[in-house]
Image (cartoon, rainbow, N blue to C red):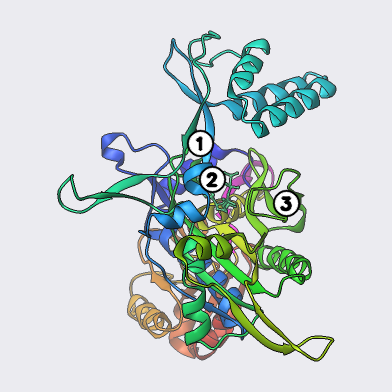
Amino acid sequence: PATSLQDIVGHAKEYGFVFPSSEIYDGLQAVYDYGQNGVELKNNLKTAWWKAMTQLHDNIVGIDAAIFMHPLTWKASGHIDGFSDPMIDNKDSKKRYRADQLLEAKAEELAAAGEPEKAQALLAEMGRLLSAEDLTGVRELIIAQDIKCAVSGTTNWTEVRQFNLMFSTQVGSVAEDSSTIYLRPETAQGIFVNFLNVQKSGRMKVPFGIAQIGKAFRNEIVARQFTFRMREFEQMEMQFFVRPGTEMTWYNAWKEARMKFHVALGLPADSLQFHDHDKLAHYANAAVDIEYKFPFGFREMEGIHSRTDFDLRNHQDLSKKKQQYFDAELNEDGKPYGNYIPYVVETSVGADRMFLAVFCNAYTVESVGEGDSAKQRTYLKLHPALAPFKAAVLPLVKKDGLAEKAQEVAASLKSTFRTTYDDGAAIGKRYTRQDLIGTPYCIVVDYQTMEDETVTIRHRDTMEQERVAIADLKAKIGYEVAM
Ligand code: ATP
């Protein structure tokens, strides 16, 4: 796995995975474009998630809701009033920071300097001030801790202000009759407002789930760490509607299921951990993060939240439309459970954050050979199901009909899994090209192929080769690349 984020950013750009957005204009902060290989890897991740969350369950279906939603949605969800970060500017450098992140960095510094009690006390004080919304107190704490701006080196701070993270825009053609709408900061609300549409049209019975993959937008104040924190990103969310009182059972079940998913896709169990939230969001009665060990430390990749009936109840209040479900199943007294607003357990993972985790984990630098002939080999150890290409077909040499034969083999595989063909450069160099983008199998057509219709398969991770009949390729590789 990668130990430096710089290596990852460089590799991602050089091999067509991720480019800075509008790079010819020097880029746009915290916005990225996926290149020809990145889009394949990301699509494969999304497909794996979709399959794990919908196809493998009888009681979970998917939707694709619009990014624009009625403005009241964000009133009901609490985003208009509560979705903000405390922000502070340095008056000299005009540089903007998140006040909580400045204090957290200071606490880390104290802990690293052998003063863990002071670090703990600082975090506790910060938590207290933020929950009391005492922004003046937060500023005083920053000054008392002598926290300097990294750019100007001064402690000349403005007051702390709450900065709403939602992007807004106008609908309507003329200013007077236009109204403000927001780009959704999470996909979940598109599911909540469609809860009854799906339940009724699909005759769904509680417990059931609705899954969605889609873009979300947040005007992050400090956007760093590559695709970890973006202003435009993609979420994969699933809201699971349950009978009130059963939510903790489902919460624990989903917690385990989601951890297993990440391990199945190749993230090692020891680079993953649960992190329970001590401070719960306004909508939750239990919450846990699945954290991955990024090059910059263990950080949240996915959240599992028990959201109670917070969202549906608020939508009911604001829309004046009942958000109830009639549960015909009989309780202990032999009576139907009857009408209620279901409770919700949600799983929410960022596609771009998961992409970064998978990419960091796959990035492998190894020395091969011994003594003077020892060399460094870099390759992406991606799960075959996630790799942009499953196979590359390479003729050993271009002449004597080998190129034509190899093209024929490639054409026969293409409709089953993504296959590339390459006849430029020496064979070793062509292996390297495939290693760098994580292609698990190189299929080589040589002179023996022309005699007996067999090829060699060279395995990416072990570099071992085996002889296989062309007729068996589809079954052999097809099995490996399936989820
Ligand atoms: P953080 O504390 O890191 O800002 P969060 O707790 O606000 O994250 P949630 O609102 O729970 O995140 O969103 C669920 C998931 O969406 C996160 O686990 C993460 O994978 C992803 N996500 C959230 N914000 C971003 C972002 N700015 N860029 C990329 N992915 C994001």
Instruction: State the image coordinates of residue 124 (x, y, percent, origin top left).
Output: 76, 29
Badge 2 marks a residue whose secondary structure is helix
Q: Kindly identify which residue carries mark 2.
A: 228
Q: CA distance from mark 3 to mark 2?
A: 16 Å
Q: Residues within 10 Å of mark 3 (few under 14, many from 20)?
A: some
Nearer to the camera, 175 or 39:
175
Side (left or right) of 221 relative to 292: left
The quarter of the displayed image where residue 304 is located: bottom right
Q: What's the residue type where badge 1 is placed?
A: Arg
Residue 414 rendering spot, x and y as whole percentages: 40, 80
| Residue at image mark 3 | 271
Q: Name the kind of residue labelled 3 in the image.
A: Ser
- Residue indicated by mark 1: 224
Q: Where does the C terminus fall, quadrant-wise?
A: bottom right
Of residue 329 and residue 119, the one placed in the foreground of this image is 329
What amino acid type should be assigned to the residue bearing mark 2?
Phe
* Residue beneath the point at 51% across and 9% down: 156
Q: CA distance from mark 3 to mark 1?
A: 21 Å
Q: Earlier in the sequence, mark 3 or mark 1?
A: 1
Q: Is residue 375 magenta?
A: yes
Place of residue 246 in the rendered image (x, y in percent of width and height, measured from the top left): 76, 72
In terms of secondary structure, where does tag 1 sit?
A: loop
Instruction: Classify 39 as above or below 54.
Output: above
Check contact, mark 2 vs mark 1: CB within 8 A: yes
Q: Position of residue 265 (x, y in %)?
A: 64, 66
